[in-house]
Image (tube, rainbow, N blue to C red):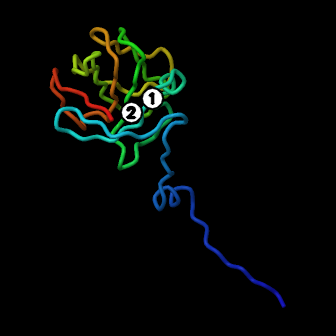
Amino acid sequence: MALVMTGCAATADQATTLAPAPVTAPDGSHAEAISVDDADLTVWVADSAEVRSRGLMGVERLPDDVDGMLFVFESASPRSFHMLDTRLALDIWWFDADGHLIGSDEMEPCPEEPCPSHSSPDEVAWALETPLGNFDFPVGAVLSTG
């Protein structure tokens, strides 16, 4: 008795079209619900030095149920971000120690050095990255977590 198996293999292009690669949170991050004024968001949280240093590097796309990444710092201080190996165009929103939005910037992907630096306008305790153009928070908007 012989067992005959037949199958169908998709090409790489077909596989991408049929089943997009799964999107997982960067190692060490977790999802959390936050709000900025009246907007409710679900974000990956980067609350350790290791996760903050990696951020969204290498992420091709966010899952439909994730709005961005919140960077949580131990204390308020001037901060600077770059986009090396980050594949998504992003807005960055800078929040002071009281959770008030004090500024924002648009950041484009940067495949190789040198990459421009994006600095906070003053001391911040949180930075929120969201896909470019998805939100339009006004200066003074209030961040609420947990």
Residue labelled with disc 1? 46
In the picture, measured across the screen, residue 139 lies left or right of residue 84, that is: left
In the picture, measured across the screen, residue 36 lies left or right of residue 45, that is: left
Three-letter amino acid code at the position of disc 1: Ala
Which numbered disc covers residue 68? none
User: In terms of image quadrants, where is residue 137?
Assistant: top left
Q: Which residue lies furthest to the front in this view?
A: 146
Q: Please name the residue shown 31% across and 32% down the image.
A: 145
Q: Is disc 2 placed on a helix, strand or loop?
A: strand
Three-letter amino acid code at the position of disc 2: Met
Q: Please name the residue shown 48% across and 47% down the image.
A: 23
Asked if the residues shown at circle 1 and circle 2 are in contact, with their CB atoms under 8 angstroms apart, the answer is: yes
What is the x, y in percent for residue 11? Answer: 57, 60
Q: Please name the residue shown 45% across and 26% down the image.
A: 47
Residue labelled with disc 2? 69
What is the x, y in percent for residue 71? Answer: 40, 25
Neighbours of disc 2 within 10 Å: few (<14), some (14-19), many (20+): many
In the picture, measured across the screen, residue 143 lies left or right of residue 12, that is: left
Q: Nearer the viewer, residue 119 or 113?
A: 119
Q: Nearer the viewer, residue 19 or 12?
A: 19
